[in-house]
Image: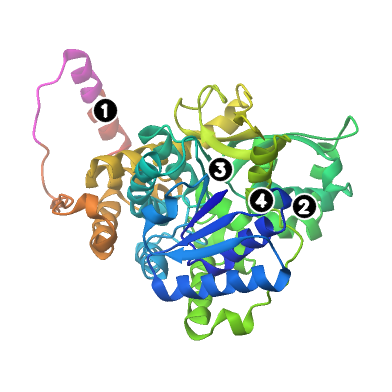
Amino acid sequence: MKIAMIGAGSIVFCKTLLNDMLQTAALAGATYALMSPTEPKLRKMEALAQRMISDNGVNAEVYATTDRREALRNADYVICMIQVGGVEAFRHDYEIPLKYGVDQCIGDSLGPGGVMRGLRTIPVLVELVKDMEEVSRPGALLLNYANPMGACCYALGRVSNVPFIGLCHGVQTTLDLISGYVGVPKEEIDYLCAGINHMAWFLKLEHKGRDLYPLFKANCEKPEYYVNEKVRIEVMRHFGYFMTESTGHLSEYVPWFRSSERALREFCDQPAFGGESGAYYRWCRLVAEKYAQIDPLEYEATTLEPRSVEYCSYVLEAHATGKPFRLQGNVRNDGYITNLPPGCCVEVPVYVDREGLHPLRVGALPPQCAALNQSNVTVQTLAVEACLTGDPELAMQAIALDPLTSAVCTLREIREMTAELLAAEAQWLPQFAGKTLCPTPSIAVPADVEPVEVPLDPALAIGKRFGTLLSQELGGPQK
């Protein structure tokens, strides 16, 4: 068995997944091919992985390469965890929108940051699946961890028939929170969750046939519970269902919580991923600085820990052994959620066994939930189209339709911001080479200018005359 890990320079995340797989008996004897274009970080990860294998007596082999096709050659499984542009590009994603008043906490899934990350990442994923089609084993499975998950998997579903699934830990970690709020072990909660990545709805929460929602909602109204997840609880109050991901994430996907200083103070006042501005960018920068200075062989423990909540090792185990495993996966919407667009990326229950991936048909979401999902899917759709066609106008329109950005900026400001982002990140955006956004003319309208008289339909003309008369009666122009 060969497992290719693309983006293995991600030392923290790569180590977590390696730890899980090395702990999985069904994967004994596997060869791990670590690939990254960044040589120093890759060699550090290779040395750490070799130490993990030898120190724990695991039956496995590992090697590293900067050649993606070599890593993919004859691979049975491909794990993608790339971050194109790294922290340098991420800085632009955060700092440039902030100049225009768009305050992002995470900035990796939606909004200007999410769109730009998608524009950088999707071309690499397109090349990745092309390589898989040519050199990996037939039926090789792609497990994608790269964000923005929704846009990336949307694009994968359009360009290739390589079987793929997008993996995230939002459902698992949210279940931890729900379990603590209702006092029921996570393993005993019967739930149904569906929607889109980072905005999937818990449609059912039960314990031995008892509906847990009344207790959960009652506890969420207590200050000591509410303070942990203000945004998620606020959305549940008004839309009826709790959803995946943190306050920091969700506050970016809707227009109500980061579009004014008042809203930020009230709902996004907790540190780090509780809503703090730039929390994820600063965390990534600190990690990058740490690993640029030290050797993980000296500082990182090699003792294998119990398997984490990440789905990766469990998916591979189920596929290798045939023992079914259920998870929440991101897949192409082939009728699984009927009131979201066909072909978009949806997050639904998925079973895995030796025969592959088996997503479950959920049907229609509650209409208010589908509407909130659709606001994000629309942005993803335009971002994918912009990336695949190389049209910068579509990139601007994707950002313009982002719920948070549209609540903060004018269209002229969004165009200027997009042009600045595209210019700052041009080295990672080959699809836009030689293309620029058309600037919007700035027209000054003098106070005394008279509108051009345009002939009107008689019915409209009557309305205009009535408006003029009414204005005169009321003493001046009226709206």
Looking at the image, which residue is at 43% across and 34% down? 157
Q: Earlier in the sequence, mark 4 or mark 3?
A: 4
Looking at the image, which residue is at 52% across and 62% down? 105
Report whether residue 188 is seen: yes
Q: Which residue is mark 4?
A: 27
Disc number placed over residue 197 in the picture, else none: 3
Q: Earlier in the sequence, mark 1 or mark 4?
A: 4
Marks 3 and 2, how far apart at CA: 18 Å
Amino acid type at image mark 1: Gly
- SS assignment at label 1: helix
**Circle 1 Cα neighbour tier, 10 Å, few/some/many (<14 / 14–19 / ≥20):** some
Task: Please give the range of residues in magenta.
Answer: 452-465
Q: Earlier in the sequence, mark 3 or mark 2?
A: 2
Marks 1 and 2, how far apart at CA: 60 Å
- SS assignment at label 3: loop
Does the residue at mark 3 contact the one at mark 2 (Cβ under 8 Å)?
Answer: no
Q: Which residue is mark 2?
A: 176
Marks 1 and 3, how far apart at CA: 49 Å
Q: Which residue is mark 1?
A: 467
Marks 1 and 4, how far apart at CA: 77 Å
**In the rendered image of this protein, does residue 102 appear above or below residue 167?**
below
